[in-house]
Image: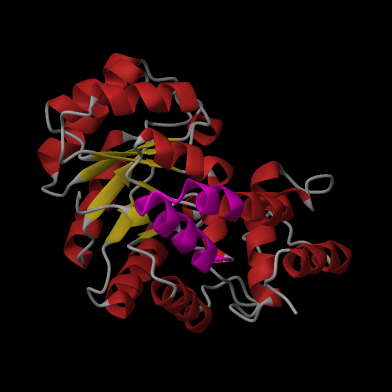
Amino acid sequence: MTKFHGVVPPVVTPLNADFTVDYPSYTRVLEHLIGAGCQGVFVLGSTSEVVFHNEKIRREILEHSVKIVNGRVPVIAGVLDATTDNVIEHARVAKAAGAAAAVVTAPYYTVTSQPEIIDHFRYIKDAVDIPLVAYDIPVCVHAKLARSTVTTLAREGTIIGLKDSSGDDGNFRYALLDLAEHSDFFLMTGSEIVVDNALSMGAHGVVPGLANVDPHGYVRLWDAAQRGDWTAARKEQERLCRLFEIVWVGQNRVSGGASGVGGFKTAMRNLGIIDTNLMPRPRQALNDAEAAKIDAILRSTGLLG
C-alpha cells in the first residue's frame, strides 16, 4: 500500500466573528478527523478556502496543523496559486513546515496549455524537494489535467499522486489503468458520492470534504471496501449520499462553492465541532432557515438525535 491512502479529508477552516482563523475550533476539527481513523489530512485546499487566506495566514494554518497532528498521520498541504513562481514559494513554506507532500493544480486565471501545465509541475519539482500531488479540479481552475499530462508527469516521477475532483470518472479509470504498473503512485477521488465506485475500480483512497461532517462514515466505507464487503460499502455510500444533500441547501441564495462549504460548516457548528459557520468575505454563511434544513438531514442520516 502506498504511503498516502485511505480517507484523507480536506480540512475546513473555521472562522471567528472577526473573520480570523478560529484555532481552537480548527484543532477540534483535526482531532475529530484523526480520532475517527482518517489516514491523513489535506490542509489549505478548496474546502479550506485557501484562496481567501494571505501568505502569512496560510503559513500559520499549516504550522498549526503540523503541530497538532504531531506525526500521527501525514499532513498534505495545498500550495495553490495562479502562477508557477508563487506556487514555488508556497511549496518552500510547506516543506519548511513539515508537510509530507504539496498539492498543486494547474495555473488558474490565465489560460494555460497542457505542455505549459507539464512545465509548471516540472519547474516546481526542480525548485523544491517535496513530493508533489496533482490536483485536477477544472470547476475552479478552468483547465482539465489531460490523461496524457497525468501519465507523463507520473511516469517521469514529477508527481507521486493525483487527487481527482474533476467528476470525470471515465478519465479517472483510464488513469488507474495507465498507471497500474507504478506501485508507488496513488490516485484518490474527491467525489464524495461515488467513493464505492472509485474504490471498486482500484482507487487508493478518497479526499471527501463531507468527511469534515462525518469522518466515521467514510472510514466505515473504506474499511468495508478493504475487506471486500461491497454490500456494506454501498449501504454506507448511499447514507453519505443523503447526507451530501446539505451542500445544496443554500444554493438558491449563494454560489455553489459557498453553499457546499457553507453546508459543511453549518452542519459542523450544529454538531458542536466548530463555533461558527462564518464564511470568508464576500461569501455568505447559511441562515437560520437553511441551518434548520441541514439539521433535518443530519437527523435523517443518524448524526443528530
Principal secondary structure, stretch drawn in magenta? helix
Relative to 149, does residue 283 appear above or below in the rendering? below
Residue 14, image x, y percentages: 56, 70
Residue 244, image x, y percentages: 66, 52
Residue 256, image x, y percentages: 69, 43
Q: Quadrant of the C terminus?
A: bottom right
Residue 272, image x, y percentages: 64, 81
Judge left or right: residue 187 versus residue 257: left
- How was this image coloured? secondary structure
Judge left or right: residue 209 versus residue 289: left
Q: Is residue 44 visible?
A: no
Judge left or right: residue 166 versus residue 100: right
Relative to 219, does residue 253 appear above or below in the rendering? above
Q: Nearer the viewer, residue 98 or 71?
A: 71
Identity of the residue drawn at 33% across and 63% down: 39
Identity of the residue drawn at 83% across and 48% down: 253
Relative to 232, does residue 296 appear above or below in the rendering? below
Q: Is residue 42 visible?
A: yes
Relative to 267, does residue 120 appear above or below in the rendering? above
Query: What range of the chain is rendered magenta?
Result: 214-235
Residue 150 appears in which quarter of the rendering?
A: top left
Identity of the residue drawn at 65% across and 49% down: 241
Residue 139 appears in which quarter of the rendering?
A: top right
Q: Residue furthest right?
A: 289
Q: How many marks?
A: 0
Residue 217 on the magenta span:
yes
Residue 241 on the magenta span:
no
Identity of the residue drawn at 63% across and 71% down: 268
